[in-house]
Image (spheres, rainbow, N blue to C red):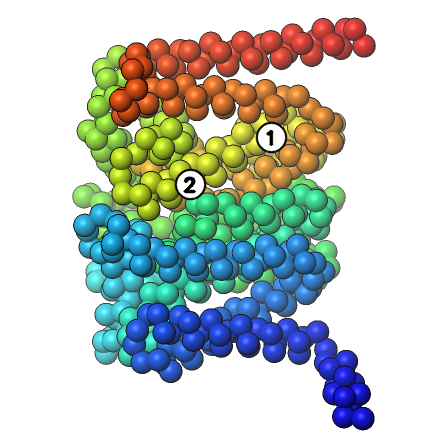
Amino acid sequence: MDSSHTDNKKAKLKPGHIDLIRNLAISLGVGVLLSLLDGGIFWIGWLAYSAVLLAGLQIVTVLWRSSGGSQKLGLILLLAVFLRLGLGMAFSFLLPRFGYDNGAHNVGYVYRDAFTRDTRAWELAGSSDSLLSAFDKSTSIDQYGGMLFLSSTLYRFLSPDAHRPWLIILVGALMSAVGVALAFRAARLAWGEKSAFLMAWILALYPESILLGSAQMREPFLMTFLAMSFWGLMKWKENRWICVAWVTGGLAGMLLFSPGVAAVGILALAVWFWLTAKERKYFWWVVAGVVVLVAVSLLLLSGAVSGSLPIKGGPLENLLNWLHYSSAWDAYLLETHSGWVQNVFAILPASLHTPFIIVYGITQPLLPAAIADPGVWPLRVLGILRSLGWYALVPFLIYSVRPIIKMRESRERLAWLWLLIVAWGWIILSSARAGGDQWDNPRYRVILLLFQAVLASFSLVWARQVSDRWLGRLLAVEGVFLLSFGYWYAGRYSNLPLKQLHVLVIIGLIVIVSGVILVGGWISDRLRARRA
């Protein structure tokens, strides 16, 4: 009698109630572990971690349920959260012991920017100053203020007794999972479930994204706010007010964390949405709204960067000077810190220095260099994983040109061509902005991972459908590139008896062998078509 009554009560529990009970148990359990490991007053830390985790898991669970509740998507979202949280915790223990002897590594931060901003956030949280002072450029070390404001708010109200950097990591990890879930839902509506799942895997497991989600950095938030706007646009036909709410929320978040990304993101999505619309009606208020939003974003960006300029001017002049000074500084650092780059610059005419830096930046982080890196082992392993992620993704970004030009429907081809321009334009801009820097360049690049993941998943699905040989040939070209530079780095940094070749000879060999592969493939296809 009692047993059947208990079974009936369990049967009456709704999925939402079961989710809440499960998430509460997970949050309390993980909260105990985090609070025991990070110090401070136990019960304050336990409540803080548990509250943040429960709120985040509930949001992720609601998105998962409304996306169909598949086990595969659930696994992707769980990995998105706990890989980032776990890596952030691991670095907190590993870097003070095995990292470099500097201020950031000695207290467990991978990025110096994260260390200085998070330290300032803890100071602001413990002071009597208004939290809005995070946006004061005269005292703030955060260029835009959004990340500093969020961190100091969490510290002031949830962790007043101790500095808990893992709290910010946890929020970033949960935000990353929210972004994956929203991007999956939008992509499924736009291109189908197969492409959506591939894109979700890329967003969740891409090493650079995991790294930034495991640190106190703003990139995971920007990526999620961009996904919010993407999902909002996909709701236009169903409910325009919901569309406006999602897009507005995503735009507001991007403006707080980076007005420049807001301008690029909203323009990219707006043009793509117009190109994919079946009825291209011009509503003057929509066009005017996009123009105003982009203009406001650029004005905010100009104001944010003007403080770092030696000479200030108008908004447009500030932006152009900022790009010029920052790219010139990074180019100078690249040349002065790399002997072989100096040798290349001595041979190349000055007009080719900037194109060389851009191409060099696109190859970063270079896998052979990461393997040969004599640095501390945690960062060496991290560098190899980041390189593997980039070199697994970039062939599909290059290959995406082929399925796009093969499209017969001009409207669809234009929409995909626009996504290709946005993705590669941002990659080139990131490379020009940060040169060959192995940290800032990939960090800027990953902000628009959403568009890169869309192109990569689309390319892979198309290649499988038509059994296209060109993807394999492109992968072979990449293999030649990596093996050639692997030989060059082995000759420089190992004791192997290898003949040291000039880097231009290596580049020439890559061009020749790659040309043979590509031209040979083209001839093979022609002969096969003629026989058929």
Q: Is residue 227 above or below residue 5?
A: above
Q: Quadrant of the N terminus?
A: bottom right
The picture places residue 214, in percent across and down from the top left corner, at: 41, 56
Q: Nearer the viewer, residue 449 or 493?
A: 493
Instruction: State left or right for residue 36 relative to residue 520.
Output: left
Circle nearer the N terminus (1, 2): 2
The picture places residue 218, in percent across and down from the top left corner, at: 39, 55
Q: Nearer the viewer, residue 320 or 367?
A: 367
Badge 1 amino acid: Ser
Q: Nearer the viewer, residue 399 or 309?
A: 399
The residue at which mark 2 appears reads as 386
Q: Is residue 225 above or below residue 45?
A: above
Q: Quadrant of the C terminus?
A: top right
Q: Which mark is residue 352?
A: none
Badge 2 amino acid: Arg
Q: CA distance from mark 1 to mark 2?
A: 22 Å
Provide the secondary structure element on which disc 2 rests: helix
- Give the residue at x 62% y 12%: 521
The residue at which mark 1 appears reads as 400
Instruction: State left or right for residue 376 relative to residue 179.
Output: left
- Mark 2, residues whose alpha carbon is within 10 Å: few (<14), some, or many (≥20)? many
Q: Is residue 404 above or below residue 96?
A: above
- Give the residue at x 70% y 58%: 70
Nearest to the eye among marks 1 and 2: give it. 2
Provide the secondary structure element on which disc 1 rests: loop
The picture places residue 139, in percent across and down from the top left corner, at: 21, 62
Task: State which quadrant residue 144 falls in.
Answer: bottom left
The picture places residue 126, in percent across and down from the top left corner, at: 25, 76
Task: State which quadrant residue 362 falls in.
Answer: top left
